[in-house]
């Protein structure tokens, strides 16, 4: 932030009312995300309200983490216990207040601010202008596409006193949104990139959208625009004094007349001013969209006073903005243009032009979804048809209801599918040979799946983690318990092989109450990754006491000796530490047994610095109904032990006993908290709710080579694999070093290739395994599923006499984890 603020200043800026405990510290940071707070003592947390969550729900936990300043809705009832621990500013609307603070901060910046808006190219112009200006200035700019009602304030808070120029983009999707953005950004120099049809449904028409966007520049000194955009030009010139305008055009009569010369992947941009003086710039792009964006960049840099050599040096180092229009190798020597986030006519034109520039010449195919938020369908698709016609496409594949209108224009070249699922069902990659395929569509159509189907396969093994399935499973178990029952989630052993930090972060956003890890190092790693949930450490050791203290980890205490050592440690360091007591009621692994209770009670009295956060026990056989009597006896014994321990406590710790299977089998014993483990990953071991859970992990690899062998040939080490009648084998890029169990050797395991079973032949090798594909039309690069939706972990575990836990946790860290979230 440019200027640290006191609570009194914030009250004046926001019109709010201060309450709670007063703190003299100044606020230097503002956060809306409880997961991304670095300096809590200097941070104001703004509790925004959304459709699904209220930021105020996180305030008690944030106070625990040291945050003392909060901006809240005046309708939120502040719990009395919090008023003595933090300062609160109550306002009518926290988003409006956030914007007011941003507007105040913007006024403290006395250097140039560039405001950028338009339908397309905002982010690219901002990024490229930043790259060019950075040759001469220290530049602040909006991160990524932070151009919304909340993104703009966050961008402004990123401006520091040392910045010499700030670049801020503004995006709107309906009338009435630009006024607050203009109030905050207050640009001195404006850039209107262009106008297109995206979000047109939020406006009465194109003119209305232009006028809305132009509000950003109501007070700016100078505005850069392209005069060749007739509608934009007319609206601008009707509303702004000519002295405030900087126009450019391919035709004479503008402040800059632009001519372009393209050659061998480079473009010369020649600018001629009204006094007929010229300047020439060389750029590493040839498509018209990039040339338009770069022209805006050059003129803005000149206007800001940057000299020509510095501008050219910046242009020499321009990098493509990683947003879309990615060229990728496709199947059968085809090329893919991945434009899976496009959603308007202007973007489609850019993509088609990019397609037309590719060499060598190939058959051109367009895969296009419905264009969402684009206005009147009849008019839009008539324009789409004209656009397609001008680029001479050989084949058009439409996905969606509205795009089917193109059938009338291209009866012989058009085919339509109602959904992406239907397209994928009929999409045969082998029918695409040496083609140039443009895949462009709105985000809801998930066209990345189409790209994946048509993309050239790259050898490698991946474990795909479906975070949507993880969310589904978490919510399933959440519904099995009472609303007040807390949920502890086990993320030990690299989160059952899935990647602890990534999964822990997702659980944190879903509302898990506790995490549990096996060792202190795992907890430290999560803390370093920004995980702030309470973390229970199941197997602490004396050597990790310093880590427990430093990273606020909560150890399990399982014996009198360990309790005594930890108690002396906390007393010597004059600290308090939360601990969890493990009660052994039949597992006979770790934990206090019944005869330990008198000594345990004495220890609790002797070391009050150790706060008992919870008491728990492990059920031995909750998975199987045959152990029900023993499980119930465990639960009864645990309740007796718990009651005795509580006689020496003047507070009530959490009580928990149920694991994933126990949640299903013994819901009446859910107590204060349950522990979710293997169930989160889609394995329901009781068999009662198999269909209710979704598999989270899919382990897949690729075929490295296919060989045809004669009768009598053997395969692999020790000649264990035999093909008496000959046949075909495929070598897969996975082995026991990746975690694929060697017990699957010699036909005990199988994989799926093209949805057909391919049994393991011979022994599993360290980095490879061979499968029999005699009955499958397999080829190098094809995908092989080790486990996932079609091959259950439980079935595979049963084949080699183990449990799903082992298969999940054995996957090596060298296997790439890929996380999906729609």
Image (tube, grey):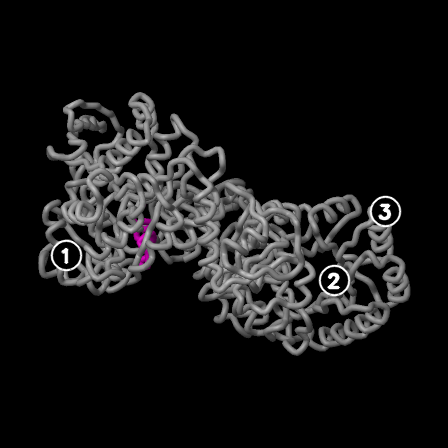
Q: Is residue 270 left or right of residue 54?
A: left
3 vs 1, front mark: 3
Task: Please name whichever residue, 85 or 275, is drawn nearer the observer in this view of the structure.
Answer: 275
The reply to whether callout 3 and callout 2 are in contact (CB within 8 Å) is: no
Mark 3: secondary structure: helix
Residue 89 placement (x, y as % from top left): 57, 59
Residue found at the far top of this picture: 309
3 vs 2, front mark: 3
Task: Please name whichever residue, 572 or 127, is drawn nearer the observer in this view of the structure.
Answer: 127
Residue displayed at 23% across by 52% down: 210
Write the start and end of the magenta stretch as one range: 443-455
Q: Is residue 184 left or right of residue 533?
A: left
The reply to whether callout 1 and callout 2 are in contact (CB within 8 Å) is: no
Density class for disc 2 (Cα within 10 Å; few <14, some 14-19, many ≥20) is some
Q: Is residue 787 visible?
A: no
Task: Please name whichever residue, 539 or 815, is drawn nearer the observer in this view of the structure.
Answer: 539
- The residue tagged 1 is 414
555 falls in the magenta region: no
Residue 287: image quadrant is: top left
Residue 155: image quadrant is: top left
Mark 1: secondary structure: strand
Density class for disc 1 (Cα within 10 Å; few <14, some 14-19, many ≥20) is some
Residue 242: image quadrant is: top left
Residue 785 placement (x, y as % from top left): 43, 53
Mark 2: secondary structure: strand
- The residue tagged 3 is 572
Who comes first in sequence, dot 1 or dot 2? 1
Residue 613 is tagged as 2
Please identify the dominant SS of the magenta region: helix
């Amino acid at each position: 932030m440019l200027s640290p603020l006191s609570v009194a200043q914030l009250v004046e800026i926001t019109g709010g009312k201060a309450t709670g405990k007063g703190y003299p510290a100044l606020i230097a940071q503002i956060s809306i995300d409880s997961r991304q707070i670095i300096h809590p003592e200097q941070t104001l947390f703004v509790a925004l309200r959304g459709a699904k969550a209220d930021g105020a729900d996180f305030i008690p936990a944030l106070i625990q983490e040291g945050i003392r300043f909060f901006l809240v809705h005046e309708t939120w009832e502040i719990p009395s216990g919090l008023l003595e621990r933090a300062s609160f500013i109550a306002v009518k609307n926290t988003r409006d207040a956030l914007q007011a603070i941003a507007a105040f901060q913007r006024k403290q910046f006395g250097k140039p601010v560039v405001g950028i808006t338009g339908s397309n190219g905002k982010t690219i112009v901002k990024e490229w202008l930043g790259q060019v200006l950075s040759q001469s200035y220290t530049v602040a700019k909006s991160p990524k596409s932070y151009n919304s009602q909340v993104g703009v304030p966050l961008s402004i808070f990123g401006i520091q006193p040392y910045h010499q120029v700030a670049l801020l983009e503004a995006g709107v999707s309906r009338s009435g949104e630009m006024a607050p953005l203009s109030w905050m950004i207050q640009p001195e120099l404006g850039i209107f990139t262009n106008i297109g049809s995206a979000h047109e449904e939020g406006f009465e028409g194109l003119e209305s959208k232009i006028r809305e966007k132009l509000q950003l520049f109501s007070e700016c000194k100078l505005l850069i625009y392209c005069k060749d955009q007739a509608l934009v030009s007319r609206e601008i010139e009707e509303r702004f004094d000519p002295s405030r305008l900087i126009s450019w055009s391919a035709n004479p009569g503008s402040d800059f007349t632009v001519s372009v010369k393209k050659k061998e992947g480079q473009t010369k941009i020649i600018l001629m001013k009204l006094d007929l003086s010229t300047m020439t710039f060389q750029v590493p792009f040839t498509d018209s969209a990039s040339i338009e964006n770069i022209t805006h960049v050059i003129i803005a840099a000149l206007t800001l006073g940057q000299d020509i050599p510095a501008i050219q040096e910046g242009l020499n180092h321009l990098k493509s903005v990683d947003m879309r229009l990615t060229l990728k190798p496709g199947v059968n020597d085809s090329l893919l243009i991945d434009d899976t986030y496009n959603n308007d006519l202007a973007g489609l034109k850019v993509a088609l032009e990019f397609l037309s520039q590719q060499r060598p010449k190939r058959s051109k195919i367009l895969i296009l979804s419905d264009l969402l938020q684009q206005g009147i369908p009849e008019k839009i698709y008539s324009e789409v048809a004209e656009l397609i016609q001008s680029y001479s496409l050989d084949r058009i594949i439409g996905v969606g209801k509205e795009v089917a209108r193109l059938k009338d224009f291209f009866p012989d070249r058009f085919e339509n599918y109602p959904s992406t699922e239907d397209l994928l069902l009929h999409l045969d990659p082998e029918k695409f040979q040496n083609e140039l395929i443009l895949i462009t569509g709105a985000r809801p159509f998930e066209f990345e799946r189409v790209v994946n189907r048509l993309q050239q396969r790259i050898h490698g093994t991946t474990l795909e983690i479906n975070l949507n399935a993880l969310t589904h499973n978490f919510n399933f178990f959440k519904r099995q318990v009472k609303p007040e029952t807390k949920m502890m989630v086990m993320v030990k052993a690299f989160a059952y092989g899935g990647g602890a930090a990534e999964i822990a972060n997702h659980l944190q956003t879903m509302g898990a109450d506790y995490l549990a890890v096996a060792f202190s190092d795992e907890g430290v790693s999560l803390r370093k990754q920004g995980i702030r949930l309470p973390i229970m450490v199941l197997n602490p050791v004396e050597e990790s006491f310093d880590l427990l203290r430093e990273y606020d980890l909560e150890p399990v205490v399982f014996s009198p000796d360990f309790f005594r050592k930890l108690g002396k440690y906390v007393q010597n360091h004059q600290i308090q530490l939360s601990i969890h007591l493990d009660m052994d009621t039949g597992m006979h692994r770790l934990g206090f047994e019944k005869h330990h209770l008198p000594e345990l009670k004495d220890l609790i009295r002797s070391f009050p610095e150790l706060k008992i956060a919870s008491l728990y026990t492990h059920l031995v056989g909750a998975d199987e109904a045959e152990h029900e009597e023993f499980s119930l006896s465990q639960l009864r014994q645990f309740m007796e032990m718990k009651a005795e321990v509580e006689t020496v406590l003047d507070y009530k710790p959490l009580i928990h006993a149920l694991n994933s299977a126990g949640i299903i089998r013994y819901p009446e014993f859910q107590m204060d908290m349950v522990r979710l483990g293997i169930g989160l990953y889609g394995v329901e071991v009781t068999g009662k709710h198999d269909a209710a859970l979704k598999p989270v992990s899919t382990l897949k690899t690729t075929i490295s080579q296919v060989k045809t062998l004669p009768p009598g040939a053997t395969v692999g080490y020790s000649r264990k694999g035999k093909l008496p009648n000959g046949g075909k084998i495929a070598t897969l890029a996975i082995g026991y070093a990746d975690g694929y169990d060697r017990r699957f050797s010699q036909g005990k395991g199988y994989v799926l290739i093209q949805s057909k079973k391919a049994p393991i032949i011979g022994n599993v090798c360290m980095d490879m395994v061979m499968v029999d594909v005699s009955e499958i039309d397999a080829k190098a690069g094809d995908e092989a599923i080790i486990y996932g939706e079609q091959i259950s972990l439980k079935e595979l575990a049963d084949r080699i006499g183990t449990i799903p836990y082992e298969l999940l946790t054995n996957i090596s860290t060298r296997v790439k984890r890929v996380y999906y979230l729609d």
